[in-house]
Amino acid sequence: MSETKTAAFVERVACISCGGSKLLELSSGRFDEGALKHFIEEDPWGEHPAPFLRGQRWSYVACQDCGLAFHRYILAPEWNERRFSKWMSQEAIEAFERPLKTPASEFRKAADYTAHVLRIEQLTRALRGSGAPRVLDFGCGYGGFLSMCSMYGFDAYGVDRSSAKRDNNSFSRVYAGIEDVDGMAPFHAITLFEVLEHLDDPHGLMLRLRDLLSAGGILVLETPDCSGVHNLETRYDYSRIHPLEHINGFTPETLKRFAARLGFTPIIRPIGCVTSDLRQIVKTVAKRMLSTLMKPTTQLYFRKL
Ligand SMILES: [Zn+2]
């Protein structure tokens, strides 16, 4: 690939959830103009993508049928490969993550993982009898959640398309693609943490994952809440709908509709209290009792019908 080439994009002409063709443009622009230009310039990169994006357009649209919003233009497969291997180098990822990683955030992440483990153990009891929960973490990254599952005796597997992440994984049963885990199904639970927002074809992938889940199995979906984000004007917008990274912008409502179309029904997330702080427990229980007043979320549990 010559250094002077322009990145190629492909157009998503139909809704990535319901297949509807009535797409309303919410905002659009060029990669080399306005706020987006500066956000991209300021980010850490390996090979800088700006020269390849010159003159290219982005367009953020919403489906008129189901309401899901997403980026119409996404990088063509060979350019997406380049994004993974060159633009987002291991050093760039580390530079990006370093300021976000604090002792408090690491502690919270591990406690969150433990809470998921406890909930999945409880929700899958009727499915597995005395057997260990079989869990697939799709988009498992460095395997943090899998390691936690493993410590609790789960039969855990992971898939991640990034070879850098697979090679630096703390967990051994991690595969490159969904086809590699076909023979290991069915799973009692499948988790996707911060994955849906990145997928070219989330509906198509979820159809395949659904087949790997046992009847009555649990699906855990966590994706950024893009409620109220319709444009790329602020750093917050950029963190939610970065047109190279976060190509799908779910809200609590569109996420539920997306899952319903695939045959999943939302369930109430059991309390997972991982703390030695009594006040924290009281707060969690009180919040649950007031749950009807709580803000809807894009961190949801579902059961396969
Ligand atoms: Zn739609």
Image (cartoon, rainbow, N blue to C red):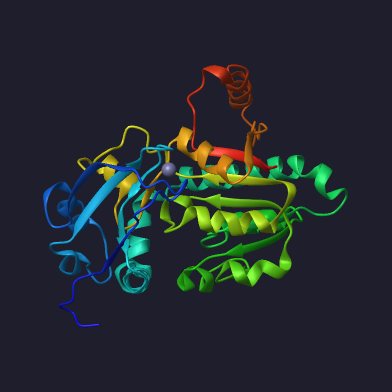
Q: Is residue 133 left or right of residue 29?
A: right
| Residue 146 picture quarter | bottom right
The residue drawn where x is 61% and y is 22% is 288
Taking depth in this image into account, of 178 and 99 the one nearest to the observer is 178
Residue 172 in view: no
Q: Quadrant of ligand 1?
A: top left
Residue 101 screen position, x and y as percent: 41, 51
For the C terminus, the quadrant is top right
Taking depth in this image into account, of 241 and 289 the one nearest to the observer is 241
Residue 48 screen position, x and y as percent: 22, 68
The residue drawn where x is 83% and y is 50% is 128
For the N terminus, the quadrant is bottom left
Q: Is residue 218 left or right of residue 28?
A: right
Q: Is residue 257 left or right of residue 91?
A: right
The residue drawn where x is 52% and y is 38% is 257
Q: Is residue 183 left or right of residue 300?
A: right
> Is residue 166 shown above or below 3?
above
Taking depth in this image into account, of 299 and 57 the one nearest to the observer is 57
The residue drawn where x is 30% and y is 51% is 242
Residue 179 screen position, x and y as percent: 61, 70
Residue 47 screen position, x and y as percent: 25, 72
Residue 101 in view: yes
| Residue 180 picture quarter | bottom right
Q: Residue furthest right?
A: 130
| Residue 279 picture quarter | top right
